[in-house]
Amino acid sequence: MAATVEEFGLWINGRWESPEGAKRFTTLNPATREPIASFVSGSPKDVERAVTAAHRAFPAWRDTPAPKRGEILLRAARRLAERKEEVGRWVTREMGKVIAEGKGDVQEAIDFIEYMAGEGRRLFGETVPSELKSKFCLTVRQPKGAVACITPWNFPTAIPNWKIAAALITGNTVVFKPASNTARCAVEVVRIYEDAGLPPGVLNLVTGPGGVVGNALIDDPRIRTVSFTGGVEAGREVYLRGARSLKMVHLELGGKNPVILLEDAAIPLAVDGVLFGAFGTSGQRCTATSRLIIHEKIYDQVLAELDRRLDHFPVGDPLDPATAMGPVASADQERKILEYIEIGRKEARLRRGGRKLTGGLYDRGFFIEPTVFETAHGTRISKEEIFGPVLSVLKVGSYEEAVRVANDVDYGLSSALYTRDVNKAFRAIQDLEAGITYINAPTIGAEVQLPFGGIKQTGNGGREAGSAAIEEFTEIKTVFVDFSERLQKAQIDVE
Ligand code: UN1
């Protein structure tokens, strides 16, 4: 008999509504396959209502002073901080990351909302001298209008808030379309803004498939910006679709992030970092360490240390604080990762792991062993994003070769170098083709007050978080104020 689960509707214009006869879907706990909750599979009509609500709410929200908007955001951040434990558990139950990371996901959301709340008293423009007398030149930031935030399942509270909090502080209204398999977490995201007293229509939630809800949002001419985080194929579709109506489309896509260990790297520190980078969140981060590029002089020693550490690396119940790695997020994820492992077995040397875990609690969920391949550069597993607990290890003979290998992929999100040589460190900051470079730290763990994003196929040139978050959701208005009381002609009256 199917267990009954809590049912949620769509949040449109400040009300939870369940459209008559709507199709529904249920999310699952990937550690147990237990159902979590049921959600509406939104239709184009639902999107239409949500966009209308966002569009109508825009003028009043735009005219609310930004510091006032900031007060609401601060209340939302405090509300989320009070509920961190509870929401962190929803993240772990619905997505499978271990509880410390579930709470970390929520903390990242809190940090960012707080940061954006403060931004309500900044939102700086520029003042620039004029070439003419008695004339001021300045810029102001203006909101875009109604925007769409389409978010992935791997950071089900942090990434939605990177987008929503930035969109709201700058005076936009939002339609939020979360990944279907973490819809329960999306409800928590909406609730904190509801509790904080956000006016009706300023934030709206429509759950459902990207091919229906996402597409309807992108096609709606009233949506001025689409902010999307997800896979590269879906991102390309979003970009092309948005291009038809000349929308600003902000993309955060994949990664194939390298950690380079030079011959003078502090090995235990580096291995700590690699384990966290490669197997944290079961490797399901855009920033995950998926390639370990080691100088040949320390290659054997590093791998021996990695093996030693992985011999005691508990995989299991993500709610148990002693667990190092939980399940992968879904049956789909499990299938794709196991397919890549099969590809790897044919083209590279499997050093450890490689199996779906079975027996006991493993039979109920989607558990895969932490997997390490030794491979030559150029194999599929060393170049394609796997988004799972699979690390490709590559041996190189020099700094130059390490950088060449690191850069020879389609992506450019995060990168890392372990060395004690300050000159090499600074060279790598110049040489590594990536939006983020870490020195003596792994490829994951970006902080919200800095811009986040990548180059090449990781995106289309934008950044989110940090100061860049404001750019993502605002138009710049350039203002000229002439108080000379006569016609002054730029470029002409200058001699
Ligand atoms: C992602 O995987 O898309 O730097 C985001 C990190 C996290 C964010 C990851 N703070 O790994």
Image (tube, rainbow, N blue to C red):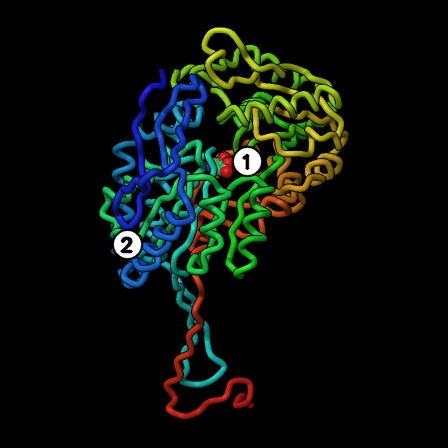
Q: Nearer the viewer, residue 216 or 109?
A: 216
User: What x and y, as percent, mark residue 474?
Assistant: 43, 60
- Whichever of callouts 2 and 1 sits on the residue coming sooner in the sequence is 2
Q: Is residue 118 left or right of residue 398?
A: left
Residue most toward the top?
Answer: 360
* Disc 1 CB within 8 Å of nearest ligand 1 atom: yes
Helix, strand or loop at mark 2:
helix
Name the residue at 28% across, 44% down: 193
The quadrant holding residue 253 is top right
Q: Which residue is mark 1?
A: 287
Name the residue at 55% across, 23% down: 334
Name the residue at 23% across, 42% down: 195
Q: Quadrant of the N terminus?
A: top left
User: What x and y, as percent, mark residue 299?
Assistant: 70, 21
Determine which of the numbered discs, if any, sits on residue 384 in the image: none
* Disc 2 CB within 8 Å of nearest ligand 1 atom: no
